[in-house]
Structure formats: C-alpha cells, structure tokens
Image: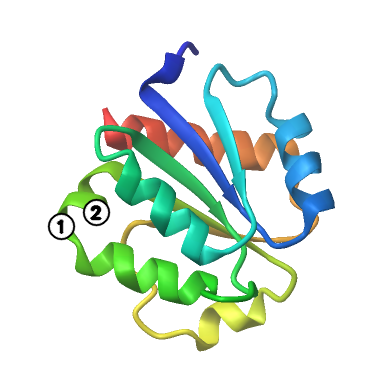
Amino acid sequence: MTAGSLYTLLIADDDDINRVILKHMLKTLEMEVIGVSDGTDAMQYLNENPNKKVIILLDLNMPNMDGSEVISLINQDSQLRERVRIIVITANLLSIYMKEGIGSKVLDCFEKPVRKEVLIDAINLGISQLN
C-alpha cells in the first residue's frame, strides 16, 4: 500500500521507548510517522496540519493532556472527525471501558504490547475510512 504523505501516523505516547518501538514496527508503512509525548502536542500537530489525514496511535495515560481528553476534543470538532482516526494503545485495557464517550472515530483499542499485524490491520482500516 502506498499512502504517501497524504496520511500521517501520529504516535502519542509519553514513553520514549514505546514511540521508538512503534516507529520501528511500522517502518514498512509508506506514511509519515510523527511522535509526540502528550495530548497537548498531539492536538497542536492536528491543528497545525489541517490538510493531513491522520491516524493516531494514542496512549491514554499521558501528562498535560491525556488520551481521553484528546478523543473528546476530536469528537467535538467536525473537521477533525472527518480526517482523524484513533487507535488506542494502553497499558490498562480496563481503563478503556471506564471512559465515557470514547466516540466512533476510535477504530480499536489494544493493550500493550500490541502485535504488529493487528496494528497494521487497524491502520489500514483507518486509511480505508479516510479515503
């Protein structure tokens, strides 16, 4: 699949090692991959790149702005809802089910560590929805 630079994979995780592992795992995808360490930086990237279609690999537990807040902000903004899809990757899958209003733009939720094949399938689903 050649997505080119039309799509961006935004990895939002406060753990440097997790970002490096995910970038390495997904290097075969022909997409721009950006890593940020919290939800504030993720939202800044989305707002500064209004023409990009973005798939976010989103950790829930981050400083400054957590993943739930990012999901909420995206769900409240019709333009972001059109061009962003979210894949939650968290250490505590149970926390997913306790969150309210997770929103339809969340493609899937995975517990760390996530398997490469499963993650690539979810990313491809996001790309097909954004086409």
The residue shown at (62%, 63%) is 59
Tell me the quarter of the picture where residue 33 sits.
top right
Q: Quadrant of the C terminus?
A: top left
Residue 16 percent across, percent down from the top left = 79, 52
Viewer-closest of 85 and 5:
5
The residue shown at (41%, 54%) is 44
Q: Is residue 27 above or below residue 119?
A: above
Q: Is residue 71 above or below residue 10?
A: below
Residue 3 visible in the snapshot: no
Q: Is residue 87 above or below residue 71?
A: above
Helix, strand or loop at mark 2? helix
Q: Which residue is mark 1?
A: 78
Residue 111 percent across, percent down from the top left = 71, 63
Tell me the quarter of the picture where residue 81 sits.
bottom left
Amino acid carrying label 1: it is: Ser
Q: Which residue is mark 2?
A: 81
